[in-house]
Image: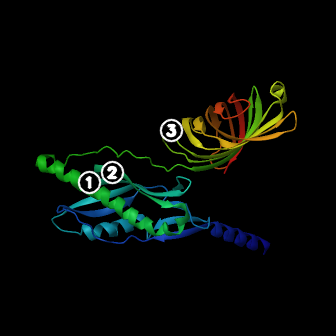
């Protein structure tokens, strides 16, 4: 009895984590100049028949599928615009890829994408021969606070991707056969569209830095958010808070007991990908804050700080989803300090990505 309870409890846990949603394609006809073909059959060659796993507005993972299945859904959609005719040419379609992706793409935005790869074929001597291959994606950006409305738009993007592929095939086929009717049965392969098949993961990184230079020492807390991608250069969103003190030995001849600075940083940060999980960090920042100093006569002074700084370093994110982030780098800074206006040093960084 306890075994049955355990199995049932496990089943309930899984169903709570993963729910399923079925997408029904609207069989809406679209305009086409086609007069030569109909779709004889749609063959789904994907190993994984689902469309994707998407996180909904309450953080639950939802598995997306086409209803009743991808082959039948696309067949029904095509039959509306390409009905059977005795004089029409039977064309076959193979589904190589059909996927819905969704990922945070900036601090405020969510990008959702339908990626599709279709192969169009004809049958000669009872053998299917490839005529055309088309890869394409349809993409849309939403506010990250608008997750609840994203699901309703997946169906439209799937239809738009299908329409693009079939129109590309028709245009290519018509162009090829209008020039030379004798080439009618020749195979024609088109190059695949240039596209990034995967959306990048969004990284939230919180780090603690220790900074050292000839005259100062201190620490910095950073928040970094960025979407990883196939691009070599990535521009993240960065916020930082710094606290620095001038070393006592550097104050001996300056007439001060202590000097502490507190700044908020912002500016331009760039990550140059050198290897998966390894990035060169190049940046320019404009720190703004306050410098509080105490003289040897115990007089306190407050000084408004503003400046400009540059940094160069390396950041390592060994685990994509969750884990430890480490980094090291150099920095150079000029600011309106009353004590030392120029500062050069190095930083060591440790943090977590989530």
Number of marks in picture: 3
Q: Is residue 115 above or below residue 348?
A: below
Res 233 label: 3
Instruction: Between residue 183 and residue 32, name the one nearer to us.
Output: 32
Q: Is residue 214 above or below residue 337?
A: above
Direction from residue 5 to residue 170 in the image, left or right: left
Percent coordinates x, y for residue 10 in the rendering: 70, 68
Distance CA(mark 3)–CA(mark 1): 35 Å
The kind of secondary structure element at disc 3 is strand
Res 280 label: none
Q: Which residue is mark 1?
A: 169
Q: Is residue 113 above or below residue 15?
A: above
Q: Residue at x 22, y 53 (%)?
A: 171
Q: Residue at x 22, y 50 (%)?
A: 172
Direction from residue 295 to residue 45 in the image, left or right: left
The kind of secondary structure element at disc 1 is helix
Direction from residue 318 to residue 168 in the image, left or right: left
| Mark 2 neighbour class, 10 Å CA radius: few under 14, some 14 to 19, many 20 or more | many
Q: Which residue is mark 2?
A: 134
Point out the image quarter for the N terminus: bottom right
Distance CA(mark 2)–CA(mark 1): 8 Å
Check if mark 2's residue and mark 1's residue have beta carbons within 8 Å: yes
């Amino acid at each position: 009895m306890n075994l049955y309870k355990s199995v049932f409890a496990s089943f309930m846990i899984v169903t709570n984590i993963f729910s399923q949603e079925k997408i029904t394609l609207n069989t809406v006809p679209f305009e086409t100049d086609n007069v030569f073909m109909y779709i004889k059959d749609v063959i789904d060659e994907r190993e994984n028949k689902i469309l994707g796993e998407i996180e909904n507005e309450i953080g639950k993972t939802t598995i997306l599928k086409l209803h009743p299945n991808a082959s039948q859904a696309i067949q029904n959609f095509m039959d509306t615009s390409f009905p059977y005719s005795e004089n029409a040419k039977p064309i076959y379609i193979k589904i190589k890829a059909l996927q819905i992706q969704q990922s945070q793409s900036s601090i405020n935005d969510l990008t959702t994408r339908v990626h599709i790869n279709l192969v169009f074929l004809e049958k000669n001597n009872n053998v299917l021969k490839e005529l055309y291959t088309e890869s394409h994606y349809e993409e849309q950006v939403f506010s990250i606070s608008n997750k609840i409305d994203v699901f309703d738009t997946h169906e439209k993007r799937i239809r738009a991707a299908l329409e693009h592929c079939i129109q590309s095939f028709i245009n290519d086929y018509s162009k090829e056969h209008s020039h030379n009717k004798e080439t009618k049965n020749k195979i024609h392969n088109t190059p695949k569209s240039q596209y990034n098949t995967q959306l990048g993961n969004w990284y939230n990184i919180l780090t603690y830095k220790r900074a050292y230079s000839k005259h100062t020492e201190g620490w910095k807390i950073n928040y970094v958010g960025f979407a990883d991608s196939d691009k070599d250069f990535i521009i993240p969103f960065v916020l930082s808070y710094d606290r620095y003190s001038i070393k006592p030995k550097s104050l001996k001849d300056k007439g001060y007991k202590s000097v502490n600075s507190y700044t908020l940083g912002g500016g331009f940060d760039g990550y140059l990908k050198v290897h998966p999980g390894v990035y060169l960090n190049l940046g320019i920042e404009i720190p703004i804050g306050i410098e509080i100093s105490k003289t040897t006569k115990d007089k306190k002074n407050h000084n408004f700080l503003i400046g400009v700084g540059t940094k160069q370093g390396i950041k390592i994110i060994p685990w994509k989803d969750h884990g430890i982030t480490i980094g090291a780098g150099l920095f150079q800074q000029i600011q309106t300090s009353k004590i030392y206006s120029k500062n050069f040093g190095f930083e060591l960084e440790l943090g977590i990505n989530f």
